[in-house]
Image (cartoon, rainbow, N blue to C red):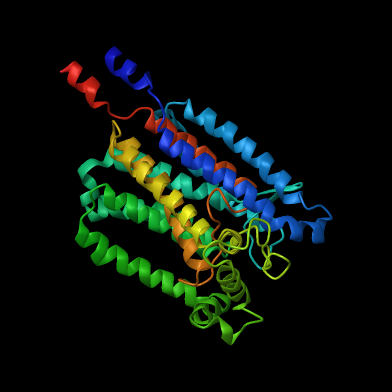
Amino acid sequence: MRKRKQGRNSMGAIDYGIFCTIILLLSIGVVMVYSASSYYAMFHFKDSTYFLKRQLAWSAVGIIVMMFMMSIDYHKIKKFTLIAMICTVPLLLAVFLFPGVNGAQRWIQLGPASFQPSELAKYVVVLYLAMALSSMGDRVKDFKKGIIPCFAIGGFYAGLVLAQKNLSIAAVIMIVTFIVVFAAGARRIHMFGVVTPVLTAAALFFALFEPYRRARMLNFVNPWKDPAGNGYQLIQSFYALGAGGVLGLGLGQSRQKTLYMPEPHNDFIFSIIGEELGLVGCIFIILLFVIFVWRGVKIASSCKDSYGTYLALGITSIIAVQAIINIAVVTGSMPVTGVPLPFISYGGSSLVINMTAMGILLNISRQRKNDKLKEKEN
């Protein structure tokens, strides 16, 4: 028992590859938030640094929280998973007590700041999956005892998020649930023969059920059918990406951010990056996310226990899925939906919550298997 306790408490060095990638993405995010928002901020708030100051403050908080979580043994999180699951439910319901923004009720207003509970819900589902699947073992191969409980919990939180008119984050939750459960050893016949058709049918139903979502779906094929309405944002994104060319117009030189692109520092910040830094800048950002996913999967595959494996995989999957969806939307590869680009898009609560998850991921990286130590012990 003492040896096991010592082995768990002894921590090695963090994965500096993923650490540097996170810091680099965060730094690029701060610079690009300022560049993308300066004109908008000057026009609306008479202060070109309005969003920069807030993003810097949230980034500082995020780094502090990440460093704190990095020093805490990730196994201790298990004790608080049920509490987090319970507390997240009233938070997801509390958004309906506050006025909606652009027809959606997703935020809890806290004075000058706001909190988006759906950002927390994504990671709460991952915490549950890691805990449940690690104790489940081979029972995950049983459809009733393994797959149904996992997707029931994921579907419950996704349903609460969907009620906020946030189909994109609800989809992220279900996609990540699929990835983690499949990686845990669920049978392919169950996952691709039953779960995939059900999730696809549900996604199509909810996408076509609401008139505004249906309009987005149909308009995505040809945004020029409604250039002043549903197609406006995507068309402006095309203009930005096209104007950037290979090398871009130069940092701070975007034309679409001058009130052509609505809130250019948010979900469509990648198009401003393309306009100012060109194809080279876009490829560099994508490469950073590829490195992040590679290192994240490597951390997951080298964990000492299944709990750490599923937790690391879930955290990595959330960032990967969001990055893929955001970039696909901005480039017109899928219908427009509101998913921020992790670490880069403007946003306080999402940034701090993501950085908290990064702290957990880095702590997992400190407790990976060490083949050399194993050889010495043997």
Residue 265, picture quadrant:
bottom right
In the image: residue 45, left or right of residue 139: right
Query: Residue 105's spot in the image, x, y percent?
Result: 64, 61
Residue drawn 67% across the image and 45% down it: 55
Question: Extreme top residue here?
Answer: 2
Q: Is residue 83 left or right of residue 212?
A: left
**Which is more toward the observer, 284 or 61?**
284
Residue at 36% from the left image edge and 39% from the top image edge: 131
Q: Is residue 338 above or below residue 133?
A: below
**As rendered, which of 263 and 357 lies closer to the eye?**
263
In the current view of this chain or complex, which residue is farthest to the right? 46
Q: Residue at x 32, y 40 (%)?
A: 298
Question: Residue 36: horizontal and vertical position, in percent?
Answer: 67, 58
Q: Quadrant of residue 193?
A: bottom left
In this view of the protein, which residue sits in the foreground, 202 or 369?
Answer: 369
Quadrant containing the C terminus is top left
Q: Name the image quarter holding residue 244.
A: bottom right
The answer to whether residue 159 is visible is no
Q: Residue at x 55, y 48 (%)?
A: 343
- Where residue 205 appears, as percent x and y from the top left, is 44, 74
Q: Quadrant of the N terminus?
A: top left
Q: Is residue 278 visible?
A: yes
Q: Position of residue 227 (x, y in %)?
A: 63, 82
